Amino acid sequence: MAKAGLPPVGENHLRGITVTITLLDEALCEIQEWADGRARGSVLYEERNRLTPKQREAIRAELQQVRAVLRELRDRFGLEPTIQDAGSAICASCAALWAYLVELEGKHLRRYGAPPPGLTEYLDPKVAELIERLQRISTIARASGTEGGKDNGHGSAEAEARRGPR
């Protein structure tokens, strides 16, 4: 693929360039959320956003500059954006979390030594419930964006709108 002023770029190089700058662009989305004031919290996880208004504005300005370079690279190499489907991402997260949760079962905890009496009897049903609930979430997410098995396009249109002009 040769663009003006560039020698042909092989598929392997192009793949490496694409993956790296796509990961960068995804990270920029999270940085943007923090610059916009994000501070999520739950039962065992909490974010503290202590960025000052001046810091937030400076970060937003830098993000604009980084994205300008990314747009240039996208255009120069003819790259297509990666569309992340929320349902697929949820299913992948649930699968990864399932693997971690299984490690909390009593038979796996023994690798750290004998668990104290009653721990596995208490923890194993809790782990089983968490795994079951993640499986339910995954099942629900598999149906996201579809009605009667057909893609309704909402996820793609939203992503397209956020991406802005090309």
Image: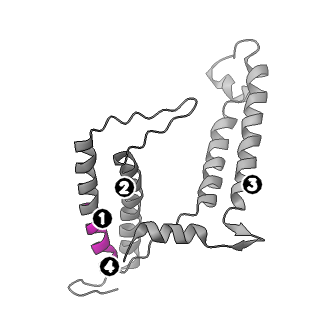
Horizontal side of 90 relative to 159 (left or right) equals: right
Q: Is residue 75 magenta?
A: yes
Q: Which residue is mark 3?
A: 139
Horizontal side of 131 relative to 83 (left or right) equals: right
Residue 52 occupies quadrant? top left
The quarter of the rendered structure image containing the N terminus is bottom left
Q: Earlier in the sequence, mark 4 or mark 1?
A: 1
Q: Amino acid at mark 4?
A: Asp
Residue at figure coordinates x 41%, y 65% from the top left:
19
Question: Would residue 82 be seen by someone viewing this image from the given angle?
Answer: no
Q: Assign a secondary structure to mark 4.
A: helix
Q: Which residue is mark 4?
A: 75
Q: Which residue is mark 2?
A: 28
> Which region of the structure is painted magenta?
66-77
Q: Which residue is mark 1?
A: 67
Q: Earlier in the sequence, mark 3 or mark 1?
A: 1
Mark 1 and mark 2 in contact? Answer it, CB < 8 Å: yes
> Eyeballing the image, is 141 above or below 56?
below
Mark 2 and mark 4 in contact? Answer it, CB < 8 Å: no
> Eyeballing the image, is 128 above or below 2?
above
Q: CA distance from mark 1 to mark 2?
A: 9 Å
Residue 55 occupies quadrant? top left
